[in-house]
Amino acid sequence: MYTASEPHDSGMLAVGEGNQLYWEVSGNPKGVAALVLHGGPGSGCVPAMRQFFDPARYRVILFDQRGCGRSTPHASDPAVSLNANTTDHLIADIEQLRRHLGVRRWVVAGWSWGTTLALAYAQQHPDNVAALVLTAVTTTTEREVQWITRDVGRLFPAEWSRFRVGVPVADRDGNLAQAYSRLLSDTDPDVRRQAALDWCEWEDAHVNLGPQPRPRLVNTDPSYRMCFARLVTHYWRHAAWRGPSELLDNVDIIAAIPAALIHGRLDVSSPPDIAWQLHQGWPASRLHVVAGMGHQSGGEMGVRTLAALDEFADIAA
């Protein structure tokens, strides 16, 4: 990993509907532009994301997507409406940020949810994308949401049972993302807090393949948990506002864009078949299925991501 360079420029960008996006730029001001798309939705960007990019070659651009991180208004506030927080709003935000920073084309790197957003963005604006690096690939279809909220519970039966009973009896055999989304909008703050905690405990459970619990989200600040849970359930219950196989069906639009698809063989949160299907219709892509890795960005996954970004710095220059 590279040493993360500190931002040399940052600011807040007004993108409409009262939203202000936090953005920052680090690395070489004259280098190849690279856009980083964080996961979640709702995780926000962190300094460690800069470490995948050679600061001598890349102009690294990070931003917090609508409603999370340092962007405002913050989705942790139940009074903040999410009606103007959709995939298409985020794509428009990315384009506004690109124009604001004077970028013609950029390398786009995404992790987890960020890969869904990267694909949706590239399919709408292929001329603005020089290359794609997608790690822990998802397309956020109803099928994938069904898997991650229900079907994968067969591997974590005790944890999933606790997750399921967190919603009212009438909702337990239905769309759990939708049920939790309603709880997170309840007028009772205790109901909202418990729903956010239950959701984050389940997320922590299914991304951990180790023998011991590895709490991550449950140990974060309550406002972070609330923001994360509200945005994830909002996007998942709408299947990212895309058709059942829309991102896969439209891969021909980006077929000539170089891409690295990096996925863990043991990713039970987002099984490798989605990355494999994308690769089948994407001649310019390379698929790296990494043995022993789950839904994560470090280890050998990080090595592959860094290598792809090093290579694409030459292609995009």
Image (spheres, rainbow, N blue to C red):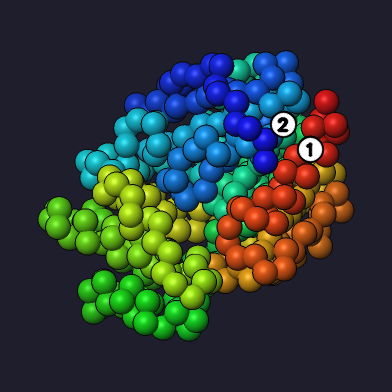
Q: Quadrant of the N terminus?
A: top right
Query: What is the three-letter code of the residue carrying label 2?
Result: Asp
Check disc 2 and report the residue beneath it: 54
Residue at disc 2, secondary structure: loop
User: From where the camera sits, is residue 16 visible?
Assistant: no
Vertical placement of residue 306 versus 246, above or below: above
Check disc 1 and report the residue beneath it: 310
Residue shown at 55% from the left, 59% from the top: 140
Residue placed most toward the observer, 66 or 199: 199
Q: Position of residue 7 (x, y in %)?
A: 55, 22
- The reply, left or right, for residue 158 in relation to residue 300 is left
Residue shown at 45% from the left, 27% from the top: 22
Q: Quadrant of the C terminus?
A: top right
Q: Position of residue 149 (x, y in %)?
A: 44, 70
Query: What is the three-letter code of the residue carrying label 1?
Result: Asp
Residue placed most toward the observer, 127 or 133: 133
- The reply, left or right, for residue 182 in relation to residue 15 is left
Residue 98 falls in image quadrant: top right
User: From where the camera sits, is residue 240 visible?
Assistant: yes
Vertical placement of residue 208 versus 12, above or below: below
Mark 1 or mark 2, which has the lower sequence index? 2
Residues marked 1 and 2 touching at CB (< 8 Å): yes
Vertical placement of residue 182 versus 222, above or below: below
- The reply, left or right, for residue 207 in relation to residue 59 is left
Residue at disc 1, secondary structure: helix
Residue shown at 48% from the left, 83% from the top: 154
Residue shown at 72% from the left, 50% from the top: 303
Residue placed most toward the observer, 229 or 88: 229
